[in-house]
Image (spheres, grey):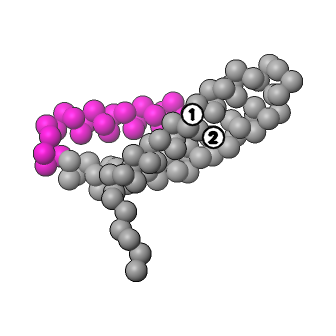
Amino acid sequence: MKATRDPIELLKSEHNAALEYVDRMELAASELNTPRHSEALETLRQGLDYLEREVRAHSKLEEEVLYPVLGRHVPKQIIESLLDEHKDLWWKM
């Protein structure tokens, strides 16, 4: 029988994974004008692919599942702020 994973722990784990990708991408961006530029470009490509695929899915889960439940316990402005952060993130991407 498969153990059920704590959904909050899953979301935290996904946040941490995304931050690791962003850190690697930041380092890669600093290496674009070095002999490692090919590897840096590949790291950036992989990072953007990850963000586009995994972070979008993560955000959708937050918006469709977490935020409605959270919205029953916190002021509406907090949820609006979280949604604005997602919109800002996708605009930047």
Using residue 44 as the reference point, say whether residue 71 is left or right of it.
left
The mark tally for this picture is 2
Q: Which mark is residue 69?
A: none
Q: Quadrant of residue 38?
A: top right
User: In the rendered view of the protein, which quadrant contains the C terminus?
Assistant: top right
Q: Quadrant of residue 64?
A: bottom left
Using residue 9 as the reference point, say whether residue 75 is left or right of it.
left
Question: Magenta region: which residues?
Answer: 71-93
Relative image position of residue 63 (x, y in whole percent): 33, 49
Disc 1 target residue: 22
Using residue 91 as the reference point, say whether residue 64 is left or right of it.
left
Q: Which mark is residue 47?
A: 2
Relative image position of residue 56 (x, y in whole percent): 48, 48
What residue is shown at x 86% (from left), y 24% (from top)? 35
What residue is shown at x 51% (from left), y 30% (from top)? 92
* Residue 59 visible within the image: no
Q: Specify which label sits upstream in the sequence, 2 or 1.
A: 1
- Tell me if label 2 and label 1 are in contact, CB under 8 Å: yes
User: Crowding at label 1, few (<14), some or many (≥20) Cα neighbours within 10 Å?
Assistant: some
Q: Secondary structure at mark 2?
A: helix
Q: Amino acid at mark 1?
A: Val
Relative image position of residue 17 (x, y in whole percent): 52, 44
What residue is shown at x 19% (from left), y 33% (from top)? 77
